[in-house]
Amino acid sequence: MIGATALVDTAKEYFAEVNLEYQKRRNIVYDALKNIPGVVCEKPMGAFYVVAKLPIDNAEDFAKWMLTDFNVNNATTMVAPAEGFYATPGLGKDEVRLAYILKEEDLKVAMDILAKGIEAYNKR
């Protein structure tokens, strides 16, 4: 509660700056996702993450594979399987949640790795 009350005194310019930064990050992730064949997603309007349907059968298996078996220059991209964010069983099985909390350049690299990972995963 103490932290929340301090927000009242925060300059509006600060929030405008933060908002613009997250819009840039969102656009990097969203635009990259829209350019990956088979990916379907909506542009988030207020969150700091995007949920994307990938051209894969099982997001949990894909997420594990990305962490254990795939890399580009010794780096990979971590995704959260979206199934756990749904109350209805079976929904989100082929979806991932991506938070855009990294710096812009890091997000660009992560999205490039994700695109290459999806391609490699489907060629296995």
Image: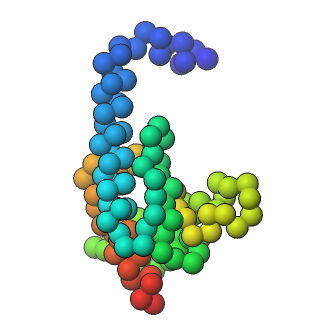
Q: Quadrant of residue 116?
A: bottom left
Residue 57 position, x and y percent, is 57, 78
Residue 96 position, x and y percent, is 52, 62
Where 116 falls versus 40 (above or below)? below
Q: Nearer the viewer, residue 45 or 97?
A: 45
Rendered residue at 37%/73% (across/down): 37
Q: Residue furthest top?
A: 9
Q: Is residue 8 left or right of residue 35?
A: right
Asked whether the viewer can see residue 1, the reply is yes
Circle count: 0
Q: Is residue 98 left or right of residue 91?
A: left
Where 96 falls versus 25 (above or below)? below
Rendered residue at 36%/47% (across/down): 26
Q: Is residue 36 left or right of residue 63?
A: left
Where 17 falls versus 51 (above or below)? above
Asked whether the viewer can see residue 107, the reply is no
Colouring mode (rainbow / by chain / secondary structure / one colour): rainbow
Residue 7 position, x and y percent, is 47, 16
Rendered residue at 47%/11% (across/down): 8
Residue 105 position, x and y percent, is 25, 53
Q: Quadrant of residue 58?
A: bottom right
Q: Which part of the image, by quadrant, shows the N terminus? A: top right
Where 88 falls versus 64 (above or below)? above
Q: Nearer the viewer, residue 72 or 111?
A: 111
Q: Which part of the image, by quadrant, shows the C terminus? A: bottom left
Q: Residue furthest bottom?
A: 124
Q: Residue furthest left?
A: 105
Q: Quadrant of residue 92?
A: bottom right
Q: Is residue 104 left or right of residue 4?
A: left
